[in-house]
Amino acid sequence: MNKINKLAIFCGSKTGNNEIYKQHALELATIMADHKIELVYGGGRKGIMGIVADTVMGKGGIVRGVIPQVLVSWEDEHEGISELIVVEDMHVRKRKMYELCDGVVILPGGFGTLDELFETLTWNQLSIHDKKVFILNTAGFYDRLLQHLEFLNAEGFLWNDLKGLLVVLNEPKELLDHL
């Protein structure tokens, strides 16, 4: 595996109902900043997204946000980061984020986060890219989804072994084993 210098974080523009989501976002961002790993993320300042960006920036790290024009006002684009790239649409956003990163970490989030997860896994499966994909399964947030992915595999609908496509982390510090 290539060294990871830039991580794309896909996560919610809300914080969710469990304080541990925010805590893990803060811990992950601290690990990234302490290890000089650049953050590539969705460009917003709300929710888990904002916590990660603010923490990396606050510790002197580099933060690159990529936000589609349609979300500029909705997600309150973050103007206090190293670079904010405004793109045409969501498809361009994802492609740009993939181009800028060496790996992807999925934190708790909603439909957009799941879309980003599945597109990343699909692109890996199709050999469009080979970036490492991590899920931070905070407090079992993704347990049911991971069970369903195993079911897809057991039923013969995946081309690759799931374990080769995805690394599940239960705590942010587990990322250190993969850097």
Image (cartoon, grey):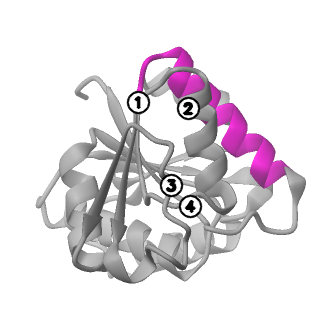
Label 3, secondary structure: give it: loop
- On the image, numbered disc 2 is attached to which residue? 56
The disc at residue 78 is 3
The disc at residue 46 is none
Disc nearer the start of the sequence (1/3): 1
Q: How far apart are marks 1 and 3 (CA)?
A: 13 Å
Residue for point 46% across, 41% down: 81
Relative to 129, residue 121 above or below = below
Q: How many marks?
A: 4
Q: How crowded is mark 1: few (under 14 residues within 10 Å), some or many (20 or more)?
A: many
- On the image, numbered disc 4 is attached to which residue? 11
Q: Is residue 171 among what the camera can see?
A: no
Q: Residues within 10 Å of mark 4 (few under 14, many from 20)?
A: many
Label 1, secondary structure: give it: loop
Horizontally, is 83 left or right of 73 in the view? left
Contact, CB < 8 Å: mark 2 with mark 1?
yes
Relative to 147, residue 78 above or below = above
Residue type at the position of mark 4: Cys
